[in-house]
Amino acid sequence: MTDISLFWHRRDLRMEDNRGLFAARASGLPVASFFCFDRYILDRLPELDRRVGFIHHHVSRLSQEYAQSGGSLHVLHGQPLTSLKELIAVLRSRGQKVVEIHTNRDYAPYPVRRDLEVAQWAEDQGISFSLHEDHVILPPESVLKDDGTPYTVFTPYSRKWHRVLESMDGVPLDTVDSLEQGSWASSPLQALPTLQEMGFDEESGNPEGWTAFDHALQPDTIRAYAERRDTPSIMGTTRMSLHLRFGTVSIRHLAALGMKHSEKWLTELIWREFYQSILHHFPHSASDAFRPKYDRIPWRQDEAGFDAWCRGKTGYPLVDAGMRELNATGFMHNRVRMVVASFLCKHLLIDWRWGERYFAEKLLDYELASNVGGWQWASGSGCDAAPYFRVFNPESQMKKFDPKGIYVKRWVPEWGTPGYGAPIVEHKFARQRAIDTYKAALAEA
Ligand SMILES: Cc1cc2nc3c(=O)[nH]c(=O)nc-3n(C[C@H](O)[C@H](O)[C@H](O)COP(=O)(O)OP(=O)(O)OC[C@H]3O[C@@H](n4cnc5c(N)ncnc54)[C@H](O)[C@@H]3O)c2cc1C
């Protein structure tokens, strides 16, 4: 029987600069790797889901990379702990005894619960279970106020983030060569489950075209970010969110580019860490208002308004363009996300949770911490949120960020013709209704 180390891939579908894989390889034991298509998550998704297509494509690519380097990636479809137990038993029957499991830490509520369960089981079996920091530069516990409490406002968080990094001589930015040392525990594999076998439409495919990887990571793109980022008609942002979501790119690589070429872009990466920190320290904010009194707002149960918003039929061109872009591609520009979210919570007075759920279904880059953070920011209920009386005017937003209607025309071809519907709610009326409703709810004892 040979002792081996098992590395478990989750939101880190790459071999390069992978902290957990590096640690497994540094253990000195031969390493086998594992990925589980998690039924707890997948069984809730519709048959056609491009995120599953994206993951499937990258797991398949990863599996080939393992084969090329002499290793093996075992891919199972099931409940993670059950699949782990199954794999460990199979490896044992082949003379390979898993004595340690390494994986990268995920800070969201479900993965935390899952990892606690696995850690407990591993301990009972005498297998060591180690979590490594790979998804963020600085994990939630390392950026705290001087009194040890978490930040709830972005600017001081961001200042502290820089100070902590400096105090560590930038070490968290160092990349690792996961393949440099160690050996593989190679063994025969089961075939990768197909999309169809897992109950998904083959059409789920891989939305690779969505991301212009090469373009995005050019120094020129990043240098031009600050001036181009707010124009939805151009490719002015990097579209790295999907890759960060599933770890097909290393955050250290991106942060180093930001440090070199654009402070503004680096700040966006820090927003991502800020929201992860908020969700970690305030897990209730995943479903409740971060500021509890905002849960007193009497949201309208307006199914018809919600349906018009979802379909991009509100009569407000920028809102409609954003929602149609989301429905067609799974992406929406950040500026437009802010406008459509504000429109739902303020103009229609619909609960931010309805919008958050809709985005969760549709966004390829859906990520709980940033999505909840973005929605609570727009509804006013979050930490460091837009004040409740700030109600975006969708027409002025369009004049400012899409003055020639290039973006709008792309998604709403009938805009400017008699075929385009009238606004479902009048701006001035809706703005005043939102301010009055919020004010009354927040004033209650
Ligand atoms: C209502 C709402 C919902 C959102 N939901 C999500 C979500 O589910 N997943 C998600 O990744 N982002 C979300 N965002 C944040 C942001 O819109 C996207 O990260 C960004 O549009 C992705 O495009 P990009 O990769 O081209 O970003 P770039 O502008 O190139 O930024 C680089 C990276 O920085 C991070 N980033 C940028 N802006 C933000 C931000 N405001 N908050 C947190 N991180 C940020 C992302 O990881 C992004 O990939 C949401 C924003 C709003 C207003």
Image (cartoon, grey):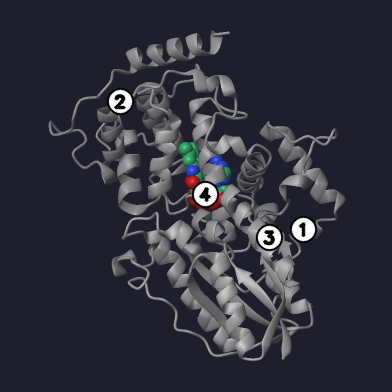
Instruction: Of the two numbered discs 4 and 3 on the same chain, state the one appearing first in sequence.
Output: 3
Determine the CA span between mark 3 and mark 2.
44 Å
Check if mark 3's residue and mark 2's residue have beta carbons within 8 Å: no
Residue at 37%, 69% (x, y): give it.
Answer: 198
Determine the CA span between mark 4 and mark 1.
23 Å
Instruction: Of the two numbered discs 2 and 1 on the same chain, state the one appearing first in sequence.
Output: 1
Mark 4 CB near ligand 1 (8 Å cut): yes
At label 3, the amino acid type is: Arg
Determine the CA span between mark 2 and mark 1.
47 Å
Instruction: Of the two numbered discs 2 and 4 on the same chain, state the one appearing first in sequence.
Output: 2
In the picture of the structure, the residue carrying the numbered disc 3 is 252
In the picture of the structure, the residue carrying the numbered disc 2 is 302
**Image-based side of 34 in relation to 358, left or right:** right
At label 2, the amino acid type is: Asp
Please indicate, yes or no, whether residue 132 appears anywhere in the rendered image.
Answer: yes
Determine the CA span between mark 4 and mark 3.
19 Å
Check if mark 1's residue and mark 3's residue have beta carbons within 8 Å: yes
Assign a secondary structure to mark 3: helix
For the N terminus, which image quadrant? bottom right
Check if mark 2's residue and mark 4's residue have beta carbons within 8 Å: no
Residue at 62%, 39% (x, y): give it.
Answer: 283
In the picture of the structure, the residue carrying the numbered disc 1 is 172
Instruction: Of the two numbered discs 4 and 1 on the same chain, state the one appearing first in sequence.
Output: 1
